[in-house]
Image: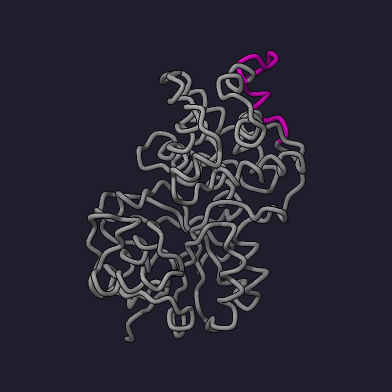
């Protein structure tokens, strides 16, 4: 039997780690990086010093800055780029994609402007592969997976055989992969949890303690589920790995970019200074913009998202945002959890 092969598009921390997982699983893997010097470092020195310092990568793993070289003849193309780059990368991929290639993405966010989920963007740009697209999500910090800490994730697809094929390529002794039929819920949960993680970092930075964080996570999960169900997701999805699982790990871990960004905001730094200090994409920031618009489109109440938007883009002091959340009118918890959950599907 011929050796299976894969291309991973995106050489940030998560893309590099997923390429390493596939290499560990015996696949012939090529990692695509935008910068030639990064591709050369990965191939020559077996490291990614910017995104994964002090980590040695599997020696069979090689990288290139040529999209054509990376994807030609591959059985799997795994796209791990920021959500706002997804359409551009998909357009570059389209003329080079094999007719039977499986396409899996691990991006978390919505496209600004169109407010489309990433699988929808891929379907539009890769119509020839529309029935072979899946999404990877779940609580999975790259810094832990690369050290082979036990991790569980989900692969969701509208086509069970596609999810099962991706599962078979990724699963191993330290990465357990479940299949899932709810693409909408998986993508919505994986995207919106970054907003709540911004809030968790902000709350911790203000010194509000564990009670506040527990409330934020719980009420944040309710917001995620309300919008997700309005968009057509299954409620039970938000009780799983791509919902509460990803939410908890992103709100509580020192590895979380979104938590760190929220923590910087709590110190009074402006958005531009926060981004400059982070030096990498913080998906929750643009997701907050998109989610606020989606809440309006689907007529769903998302007070945490609304207040974070005011902090990020309207100059509202973080402490005032928390005060306003606490001062909201009296309501019933179950009534509020369900409010706005019966909107149109998309």
Position in image of residue 83 (x %, y %): 57, 57
Foreground residue among 155 and 193: 193
Q: Is residue 217 visible?
A: no
Position in image of residue 125 (x %, y %): 65, 72
Q: Is residue 228 above or below residue 20?
A: above
Marks counted in the figure total: 0
Q: Is residue 102 visible?
A: yes
How was this image coloured? one colour
Determine whether, in the image, residue 134 is placed left or right of residue 6: right
Determine whether, in the image, residue 15 is placed left or right of residue 126: left
Foreground residue among 343 and 35: 35
Foreground residue among 101 and 263: 263
Q: Is residue 323 above or below residue 199?
A: above
Determine whether, in the image, residue 71 is placed left or right of residue 294: left
Residue 145 colored magenta?
A: no
Residue 337 colored magenta?
A: yes
Q: Is residue 324 above or below residue 257?
A: above
Determine whether, in the image, residue 231 is placed left or right of residue 166: right
Quadrant containing the N terminus is bottom left
Position in image of residue 67 (x %, y %): 48, 78
Q: Residue at x 35, y 74 (%)?
A: 63
Q: Residue at x 47, y 72 (%)?
A: 77
* Span shown in magenta: 325-340
Position in image of residue 252 (x %, y %): 39, 34
């Amino acid at each position: 039997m011929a050796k299976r092969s894969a291309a991973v598009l995106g050489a940030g921390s998560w893309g590099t780690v997923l390429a390493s997982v596939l290499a560990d699983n015996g696949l012939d893997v090529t990692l695509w990086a935008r910068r030639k010097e990064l591709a050369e470092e990965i191939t020559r020195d077996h490291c990614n010093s910017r995104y994964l310092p002090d980590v040695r990568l599997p020696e069979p793993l090689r990288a290139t800055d040529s999209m054509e070289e990376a994807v030609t003849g591959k059985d799997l193309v795994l796209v791990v780029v920021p959500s706002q780059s997804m359409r551009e990368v998909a357009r570059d991929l389209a003329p080079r994609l094999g007719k039977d290639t499986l396409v899996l993405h691990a991006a978390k966010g919505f496209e600004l402007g169109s407010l489309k989920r990433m699988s929808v963007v891929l379907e539009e740009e890769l119509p020839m592969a529309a029935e072979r697209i899946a999404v990877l999500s779940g609580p999975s910090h790259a810094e832990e997976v690369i050290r082979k800490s036990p991790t569980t994730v989900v692969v969701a697809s509208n086509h069970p055989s596609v999810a099962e094929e991706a599962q078979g390529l990724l699963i191993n002794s330290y990465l357990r992969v479940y299949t899932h039929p709810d693409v909408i819920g998986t993508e919505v949960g994986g995207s919106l949890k970054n907003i709540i993680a911004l809030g968790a970092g902000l709350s911790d930075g203000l010194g509000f303690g564990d009670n506040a964080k527990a409330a934020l996570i719980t009420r944040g999960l309710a917001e995620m589920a309300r919008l997700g169900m309005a968009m057509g997701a299954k409620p039970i999805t938000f009780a799983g790995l791509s919902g509460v699982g990803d939410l908890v790990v992103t709100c509580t871990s020192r590895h979380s970019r979104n938590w760190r960004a929220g923590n910087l905001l709590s110190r009074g730094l402006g958005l531009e200074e926060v981004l400059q200090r982070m030096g990498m994409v913080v998906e929750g920031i643009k997701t907050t913009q998109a989610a606020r618009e989606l809440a309006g489109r689907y007529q769903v109440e998302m007070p945490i998202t609304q207040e974070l938007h005011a902090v990020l883009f309207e100059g509202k002091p973080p402490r005032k945002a928390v005060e306003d959340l606490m001062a909201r009118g009296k309501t019933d918890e179950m009534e509020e959890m369900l409010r706005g959950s019966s909107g149109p599907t998309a």
